[in-house]
Amino acid sequence: MSDLPPETRDWLNSVGFAVKNEAVWLEALTHGSFNSGSNAARSETADIDYQRLEFLGDRVLGLSVASWLYGAIRGQEGQLSQRLNALVSGSICARIARTIGVPDHIRLGKQAREDGGADSDNILGDVMEALIGASFLDNGYDATRTVIYRLWEKELAGDAGKAKHPKSALQEWAAGNRRAMPRYEVIDRSGPDHAARFTVKVSIHKVGEAEATASSKGAAEKLAAQAFLEQFG
């Protein structure tokens, strides 16, 4: 027999998670702290928590997002990995969990709830993945992927994981504004070989220039590009 409250079942269905086997959803919403004290004594499912489903859901989420990125972005492997890692991060999972109302339905022990467990990024992120795992078991991959794409819609369309190297960003800025390409020049080198300091100037014709100093030429170019964008971008 399942202890899944009717209001929780209604909530899951409203989010898009079709509930067939209530037990798997109850497991996804149960934190380990619930399995102690009087809570465990009252529950017929006192030996469960969401960790196994979290493990499964993490993989389903990763595959779903990776598949979307592969079809939507013409980037190299490194760019795809950077975006994937950002989009499936615990912080984004927790953000989406809050958006859909997960905190109201987590089963926590008394002390864990008093300690703010229902608003913990770690717990919310884990439960979000566990719900995905439950959906995979109860409804299959295709249905679960559809729910993920809907819940992650704003994140997929946003800038998560899109951070560019300043030199690449400056080159794109110049092209987008119909300017000449950036020109980098080492204007000073000081210090011994083991502790050298490089000063680099980056300039764009008829726009301006910026300088930066670092312990390597590459690092100085990066800082100079960043300074240029901050000043003129």
Image (spheres, rainbow, N blue to C red):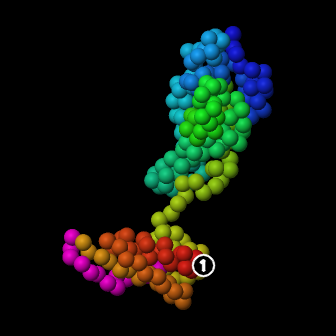
Residue shown at 60% from the left, 28% from the top = 111
Q: Is residue 219 above or below residue 64?
A: below
- Percent across and percent down for residue 7 are 78, 25
Q: Quadrant of the C terminus?
A: bottom right
- In the rendered structure, does residue 186 fall within the stretch colored magenta? yes
* Quadrant of res 116: top right
* Quadrant of res 37: top right
- Percent across and percent down for residue 8 are 74, 26
Q: Nearer the viewer, residue 59 or 95?
A: 95
- In the rendered structure, does residue 78 fall within the stretch colored magenta? no
Q: Is residue 205 above or below residue 175?
A: below
* Residue 14 shown left or right of residue 44 in the figure: right
Q: Quadrant of the N terminus?
A: top right
- Range of magenta residues: 182-194
Give the residue number, with chain letter if any, for mark 1: 177
Residue farthest toward the bottom in the current orientation of the protein: 206
* Quadrant of res 30: top right
Residue 86 in view in this figure: yes
Three-letter code for the amino acid on which mark 1 is drawn: Asn
Residue 175 in view in this figure: no
Residue shown at 54% from the left, 75% from the top = 230
Residue shown at 51% from the left, 30% from the top = 55
Q: Main secondary structure of the magenta part?
A: strand
